[in-house]
Image (cartoon, grey):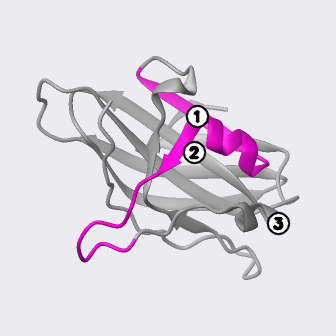
């Protein structure tokens, strides 16, 4: 699989101003992840589990990455979406909200022009620990996983 960058910006988060989320960039799915299928929806509570699935890419040219580090997990869990296919997925309209201890990660994933290589595009978002006991994933407003 080919590592790729995505374009995303985190929009309005939650009514609670203490709820702060961060999109992390500069990650790729490792070949040894053991995951398959068109999509994966994951939650990581520690860096060791995260590292088994996602690796970190070096910054390229003027692009500065913001990778997840071990320190990220001191106060955050990390929610991940991986889209696989013959085109790079571009993530837009990303938002994270918490309501009644349910975290909703909403995004729009659009595939680019298909090619011959297989791509694994990832959306990686850190959210504060302890605010949610469940996660919902919405792609273009449609629930795709819980």
**Residue 45 visible in the displayed image:** yes
Q: Residue 47: where, in percent of width, then height?
A: 73, 50
Q: In terms of sequence position, does the residue under pointer 2 or pointer 1 come before the other?
A: 1
Say which residue label 1 marks: 41
Q: Is residue 43 magenta?
A: yes
**Residue 135 visible in the displayed image:** no
Image: magenta residue range: 38-64
User: Pointer 2: residues within 10 angstroms few (<14), some, or many (20+)?
Assistant: many
Q: Which quarter of the figure is the C terminus placed in? A: top right
Q: Residue 126: where, in percent of width, then height?
A: 65, 61
Q: Are marks 1 and 3 in contact (CB under 8 Å)?
A: no
Residue 80 badge: 2
Judged from the image, the secondary structure of the residue bearing numbered disc 1 is: strand
Residue 74 badge: 3
Judged from the image, the secondary structure of the residue bearing numbered disc 3 is: helix
Question: Gap in Å between the C-alphas at discs 2 and 1?
Answer: 6 Å
**Who's the residue at 67% across and 70% down the image?**
14
User: Pointer 3: residues within 10 angstroms few (<14), some, or many (20+)?
Assistant: few
Q: Are marks 2 and 1 in contact (CB under 8 Å)?
A: yes
Q: Is residue 98 magenta?
A: no
């Amino acid at each position: 699989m080919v590592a790729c960058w995505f374009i995303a910006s985190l929009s309005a988060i939650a009514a609670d101003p203490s709820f702060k989320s961060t999109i992390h960039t500069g990650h790729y799915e490792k070949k040894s992840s053991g995951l398959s299928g068109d999509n994966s929806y994951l939650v990581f509570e520690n860096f060791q589990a995260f590292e088994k699935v996602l690796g970190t890419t070096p910054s390229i040219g003027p692009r500065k990455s913001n990778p997840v580090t071990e320190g990220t997990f001191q106060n955050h869990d990390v929610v991940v979406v991986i889209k696989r296919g013959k085109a790079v997925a571009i993530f837009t309209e990303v938002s994270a909200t918490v309501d009644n201890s349910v975290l909703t990660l909403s995004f729009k994933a659009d595939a680019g022009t298909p090619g011959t290589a297989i791509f694994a595009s990832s959306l990686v978002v850190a959210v504060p620990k302890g605010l949610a006991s469940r996660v919902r994933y919405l792609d273009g407003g449609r629930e795709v996983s819980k």
